[in-house]
Amino acid sequence: MRSWKFCLILALSLTLLLGLATACKEEKKEGETPGATQTPGGLTGELEIFSWWTTGGEAAGLQALFDLYPDVCPGDVEIVNATVAGGAGFNARQVLTTRMAGGDPPGSFQVHMGRELTDTWVTAGKMEPLGDLFDAEGWSDVFPQGVLDIISYQGEPYSVPVNIHRANVLWYNKSVFADNNLEPPATFDEFFEVADTLKAAGVTPLALGDVDVWTAVHLMETVLLGSLGPDGYEGLWTGDTDWNGAEVTQALETFKQMLSYVNSDHSSLSWDQANDLVISGDAAMTVMGDWANADYEVKKFTDYGWAPTPGTDGYYDALSDTFGLPKDAPNPDAVTCWLKVVGSKEGQEAFNPLKGSVCARTDCDTSLFNPYLQSAIADWKSDVIVGSLAHGAAASQGWLTEIVDAATAFVTDKDVSAFQGRLADACVAAEVCS
Ligand code: GAL
């Protein structure tokens, strides 16, 4: 039989333990963000990362960030990879919009720097400001000021840029060019000469995969930039360039002419399937952002060359993928640590060589990047930078949707006058033109 002394000691010990446990619990509460799941042992719970990165290089880059997460964020967080397939995020954004409207945000989501971030989410009060995180991580010193300005609203940064992509790249099959004694075209006139030679040789000059029409809009924006120059192009988004003007007419005529050199099955292919035509040599060229470079890497294709799209030498048509912290996101501490990974030197050095982009940070080790990306790193420093239309930087989402709808009709009817009228109207509807 147990003695009363034993019982007393047991009772005292239990009281002490209970007291300690309560104290620990209270201490934890004080130091924590409400709703967070940080325990003394580290972060726990689920972390849902929402993106449209499903193709080879995209998925590989994302996985590299996931792999790094436990090193930077100790604990036992389960990452949920929530992807919605479809290039440039046109499908993903529809799902995201529904979720955000229904008060069901993911932990963090991929969003383009510029109007897509600011107009859609920040001014609507859907994102948390990240100034404290930027200060704690010293990020004001490692991101270029221009990038900091674009991700900020009323002095506060609202997302963490993981990369910089270039949209105005002409990719070509080197053997096809060599077999036909061709050089990559630098001007539109040269492009059409090269295209005629290829056509006569039975090769599709330009691969396009516009099952999602954004790729045609992507091609169009490079033509607008090459025709109007950076000031004229930027003026389209501020109202300074006349959408009804003769220069825009000329650019749209050039775009129309380019469309006459694409593969006949363009409307049933995605951007990466179009890239496959260049890889196989069935097509000689494609115009695509430098995620195409990651596609070549994943597919072990090395016989590619690159050049700025016609008329755009010295211009960098830029976009950036970023991640932020939505208001009321589940597990905000785990999300904040995800943002640390995304913005870190280690994270960007792991992600970008696989993704086909350059670091948004200025201090990455350039020797980690392939020759194309090294050329992009140099150009990013020296070129005139403009913001991409198809990838969320230049125009609000509503305006972009109007342009995509107009382009959908144009790709089929090729009616320049009707197209230009719709584009001009879209600028008015966006309240940028009067
Ligand atoms: C862009 C995005 C890139 C790449 C591409 C194709 O909008 O910024 O990261 O994924 O779409 O999906």
Image (cartoon, rainbow, N blue to C red):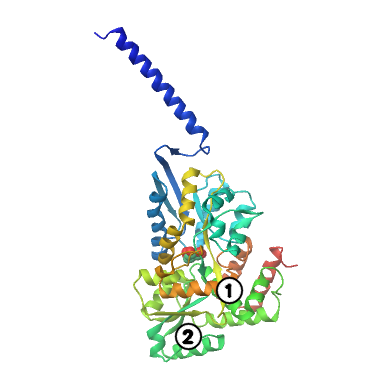
Q: Position of residue 253 (x, y in %)?
A: 61, 82
Q: Position of residue 287 (x, y in %)?
A: 49, 76
Identify residue for label 2. 184
Which callout, 2 or 1, points to the residue nearer the camera?
2
Indicate the quadrant containing the N terminus: top left, top right, bottom left or bottom right: top left
Disc 2 marks a residue whose amino acid type is Pro
Count neighbours of disc 2 (C-alpha within 10 A) and say few if under 14, some if 14 to 19, many if 20 or more: many
User: Which numbered disc covers residue 316?
Assistant: none
Disc 1 marks a residue whose amino acid type is Glu
Measure how far apart labels 2 and 1 are at the Cα level.
19 Å
Q: Position of residue 271 (x, y in %)?
A: 45, 70
Tell me which numbered mark, 2 or 1, is placed earlier along the sequence.
2
Q: Is 74 on the left-hand or right-hand side of 379? A: left
What residue is shown at x 64% (from left), y 55% (from top)?
Answer: 153
Q: Residue 187 sits in which quadrant?
A: bottom right
Is 341 in front, or is 274? 341
Q: Is residue 69 above or below residue 16?
A: below
Kindly give the residue lying farthest to the left in the view shown.
1
What residue is shown at x 42% (from left), y 44% (from top)?
Answer: 46
The response on whether ligand 1 sits within 8 Å of label 2 is: no
Q: Is residue 157 above or below residue 228?
A: above
